[in-house]
C-alpha cells in the first residue's frame, strides 16, 4: 500500500510539472492554477500542516462542498476584542446542564471527539439550549458533540483569541437546531448550530517532567465548583437550580434583587460585571479524568487515508461561495457513519464538565472552523478559562492524526480569520 501511495505521489507530481521539481514538492507548494482536489468527499482530507497543499488557506479548493471556507463574511475563529464588542443582554438557557448523557469517543483523524448517543439519551434529560441570543428564542439546540482544539505550540492552541491572547486549548460543545432533525441536516442551515467555546489551560505540573511555569498568576483560582465527586458537584449546582439563565445567575448572586426592564443595549448594569474583574479559574476534574482515560484508547488512527487525490483546474470552484442547496443535499451531507472504532464513556458527559464558573461570554455569528466551514454557527465563547491536568493535556497532544502524527505536530487550530464586519457582542 505504501508503494502504491508513492507511485501516486510521483504520478501527481508529474501532472504538476512546470516549476515542480520533485513529487515531494507538490506537498509544499502547489503552483499556480493546480491545487489538491478531491472528487470524492469520502476521501477528502484537510490538514493543519502549513507545508501541505491541504493547509487551511487552501481548504476552499479541496472539495466542491468546502468552498465556503474561502468566505470573508462570517468565518471563524476570530480575535474577540473586548473593547470593540457591544455590551448587550446576550444570554441563553441551558437545560439539564448538570445531567450526564451517554456518549462515546472516536478519532476522526483530525481530533478526538466525544459524541452524545442521542438515541440512548432519555428525552427528559436532553441537554439543550433555548432562548439563544441571535436566534429564535423558541427553538431548541441539542448537544451532540464535544471536542478540544490544541496547538503545535503548547501555549497557543485555542482557535479564538481574546484581546490577542491565545490559550493552550479550546473546548467546543456543538449544539444543533432540533427542527432540522439531526446534526448533518442542521450544519448547512443559517440557524443550524450553536457552539459554546471554553478556553482551557493546563494545570501547572508538580510531579511530571514539564517545566511550564508561565501561568498567569494574576488570576485567582477557585476549586469550589468541582472540588469533589459528581454528586457533590451536583448538589452545588442544585443550589442554583437546574435550569436558569446563565447571565442572570451572576447578577442574582451579587445583586439579589437586581431587576431589569426594557430591551436596551445597556440592559446589564455595569456593576454586574466589573470590566477588570479577575477570572476565577476552576480545575475541571471530571473533564481531566475523561481526557486522561479515553484519549489513550483512541490514540492510534487506523484508517488508511491512502486514496489518491486528484489534481484539477479549480476554476469551476467558487471559492468563497456556499455550495447550492441542491449540491449540499445530494453531495455534501455525509451519512451518519462513524469510524468503527469507538469507545463508550462509562460516565457519559455533561456540560458542567467544561463550563467555567465565570459567566461572562462573547457571542457572534460565525462558522464551523473545519471544512465545510458553513456559516451556520452562533458562537458563545466564555471569557474565562478552566484548567485540566497536565496528564490530560499530554494525552490530547499525543493522539494521532490521519497522517499518524501526534496532534501537537501541526496542531488542531485554524488560523484567525479577518471578516468584513466585526459583529461581536458581550454580556458584560
Ligand atoms: Zn471545534
Image (cartoon, rainbow, N blue to C red):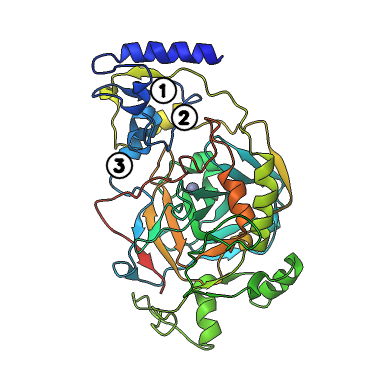
- Please name the residue that numbered disc 1 is placed on: 38
Can you say which quadrant of the picture contains the N terminus?
top right
Is the residue under label 1 in contact with that under label 2 (CB below 8 Å)? yes
Circles 2, 3 touching at the beta carbon (< 8 Å): no
**Location of mark 3 (residue):** 71
Foreground: disc 2 or disc 3: 2
Q: Rounded to the nearest whole Å, what is the CA distance between mark 1 and mark 3?
A: 20 Å
Q: Quadrant of the C terminus?
A: bottom left
Q: Which is more toward the observer, 162 or 390?
A: 390
- In front here: 332 or 56? 56
Q: Nearer the viewer, mark 1 or mark 3?
A: 1
Instruction: Indicate which disc, 2 or 1, sits on the residue closer to the N terminus.
Output: 1
User: Residue at label 2?
Assistant: 45
The answer to whether the residue bearing label 2 lies less than 8 angstroms from the nearest atom of ligand 1 is no
Q: Secondary structure at mark 1?
A: loop
Q: SS of the residue at dot 2?
A: loop
In the image: residue 191, left or right of residue 295 = left
- The structure residue drawn at horizontal position 47% and vertical position 50%, both measured from the top left corner, is 193
- Local crowd size for mark 3, using a 10 Å CA cut-off: few (<14), some (14–19), many (≥20): many
Front residue (pair 123, 258): 258
359 in relation to 299, above or below: below
65 w.r.t. 190: above or below: above
Of the numbered discs 1 and 3, the one sitting upstream in the chain is: 1
The earlier-in-sequence mark between 2 and 3 is: 2
Q: Residue at 42%, 38% (x, y): give it.
A: 48
Amino acid at each position: 500500500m505504501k508503494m502504491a501511495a508513492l507511485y501516486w505521489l510521483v504520478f501527481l507530481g508529474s501532472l504538476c510539472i512546470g516549476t515542480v521539481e520533485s513529487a515531494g514538492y507538490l506537498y509544499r507548494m502547489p503552483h499556480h492554477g493546480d491545487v489538491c482536489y478531491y472528487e470524492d468527499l469520502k476521501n477528502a482530507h484537510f490538514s493543519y500542516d502549513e507545508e501541505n497543499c491541504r493547509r487551511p488557506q487552501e481548504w476552499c479548493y479541496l472539495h466542491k462542498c468546502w468552498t465556503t471556507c474561502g468566505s470573508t463574511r462570517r468565518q471563524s475563529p476570530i480575535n474577540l476584542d473586548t473593547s470593540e464588542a457591544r455590551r448587550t443582554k446576550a444570554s441563553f438557557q441551558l437545560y439539564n446542564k448538570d445531567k450526564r448523557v451517554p456518549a462515546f469517543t472516536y478519532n476522526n483523524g483530525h481530533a478526538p471527539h466525544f459524541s452524545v448517543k442521542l438515541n440512548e439519551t432519555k428525552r427528559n434529560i436532553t441537554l439543550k439550549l433555548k432562548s439563544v441570543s441571535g436566534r429564535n428564542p423558541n427553538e431548541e439546540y441539542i448537544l451532540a458533540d464535544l471536542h478540544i482544539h490544541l496547538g503545535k505550540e503548547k501555549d497557543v492552541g485555542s482557535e479564538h483569541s481574546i484581546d490577542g491572547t491565545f490559550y493552550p486549548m479550546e473546548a467546543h460543545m456543538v449544539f444543533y437546531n432540533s427542527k432540522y432533525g439531526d446534526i448533518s441536516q442542521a450544519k448547512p442551515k443559517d440557524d443550524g448550530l450553536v457552539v459554546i467555546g471554553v478556553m482551557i489551560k493546563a494545570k501547572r505540573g508538580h510531579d511530571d517532567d514539564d517545566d511550564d511555569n508561565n501561568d498567569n498568576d494574576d488570576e485567582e483560582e477557585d476549586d469550589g465548583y468541582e472540588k469533589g465527586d459528581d454528586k457533590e458537584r451536583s448538589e452545588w449546582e442544585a443550589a442554583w437550580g437546574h435550569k436558569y439563565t446563565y447571565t442572570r445567575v451572576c447578577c442574582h448572586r451579587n445583586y439579589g434583587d437586581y431587576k431589569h426592564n426594557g430591551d436596551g443595549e445597556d440592559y446589564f448594569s455595569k456593576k454586574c460585571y466589573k470590566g477588570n474583574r479577575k477570572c476565577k479559574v476552576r480545575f475541571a476534574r471530571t473533564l481531566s479524568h475523561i481526557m486522561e482515560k479515553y484519549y489513550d484508547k483512541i490514540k492510534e488512527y487506523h484508517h488508511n487515508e491512502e486514496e489518491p487525490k486528484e489534481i484539477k483546474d479549480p476554476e469551476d470552484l467558487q471559492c468563497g461561495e456556499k455550495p447550492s442547496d441542491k449540491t449540499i443535499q445530494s453531495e455534501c451531507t455525509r451519512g451518519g457513519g462513524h469510524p468503527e472504532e469507538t469507545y463508550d464513556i462509562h460516565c457519559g458527559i455533561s456540560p458542567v464538565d467544561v463550563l467555567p464558573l465565570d459567566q461572562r461570554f462573547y457571542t457572534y455569528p460565525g462558522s464551523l472552523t473545519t471544512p465545510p466551514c458553513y456559516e451556520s454557527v452562533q458562537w458563545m465563547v466564555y471569557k474565562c478559562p478552566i484548567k485540566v491536568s497536565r496528564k490530560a493535556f499530554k494525552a490530547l497532544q499525543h493522539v494521532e492524526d490521519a497522517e499518524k502524527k501526534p496532534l501537537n505536530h501541526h496542531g488542531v487550530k485554524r488560523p484567525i480569520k479577518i471578516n468584513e464586519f466585526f459583529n461581536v457582542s458581550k454580556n458584560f
